[in-house]
Amino acid sequence: MLQISPGAILSLLATIFAGIVFILMLNETISLGKGQAPLTNLIRSLVRAYPRVSYVVAVGIGMLLGHLFWP
């Protein structure tokens, strides 16, 4: 039977986060080489335009990690 441990969930979240960061860095490198605006500028403007949404996402991630790893 498949058992999902908190360590497995944390590892999955870390892998997804590292993949997203890699894709953003690759996009930034290619965009700057072509003289275009990188995708991170769009993300930065969205976070500044909707601070409550970014706060809710941060709290949600914190609640998930706290639920999984609180002794």
Image (cartoon, rainbow, N blue to C red):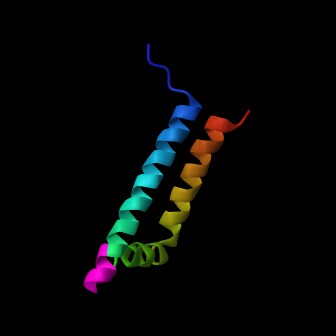
Q: Residue furthest front?
A: 33
Part of the protein shown in magenta: 30-37
Q: Position of residue 66 (x, y in %)?
A: 65, 43
Residue 32, by quadrant, is bottom left
Residue 70, by quadrant, is top right
Q: Position of residue 50 (x, y in %)?
A: 46, 72
Position of 22 relative to 47 (above/below): above
Direction from residue 68 to residue 35 in the image, left or right = left
Q: Position of residue 3 (x, y in %)?
A: 49, 20
In the rendered image, the quadrant that contains the C terminus is top right
**Which one is in front, 57 or 34?**
34
Q: Residue furthest top?
A: 1
x 42%, y 79%: residue: 45
Q: Position of residue 31 (x, y in %)?
A: 30, 78
Position of 5 relative to 50 (above/below): above
Direction from residue 41 to residue 62 in the image, left or right = right
Asked if residue 65 is among those painted magenta in the image, a careful observer would answer no
x 40%, y 60%: residue: 22
Position of 55 relative to 49 (above/below): above
**Which one is in front, 70 or 30?**
30
Identify the main secondary structure in magenta: helix
Direction from residue 54 to residue 22 in the image, left or right = left
**Which one is in front, 46 or 23?**
23
x 28%, y 84%: residue: 36
x 57%, y 43%: residue: 64
In the rendered image, the quadrant that contains the N terminus is top left
Q: Residue furthest right?
A: 71
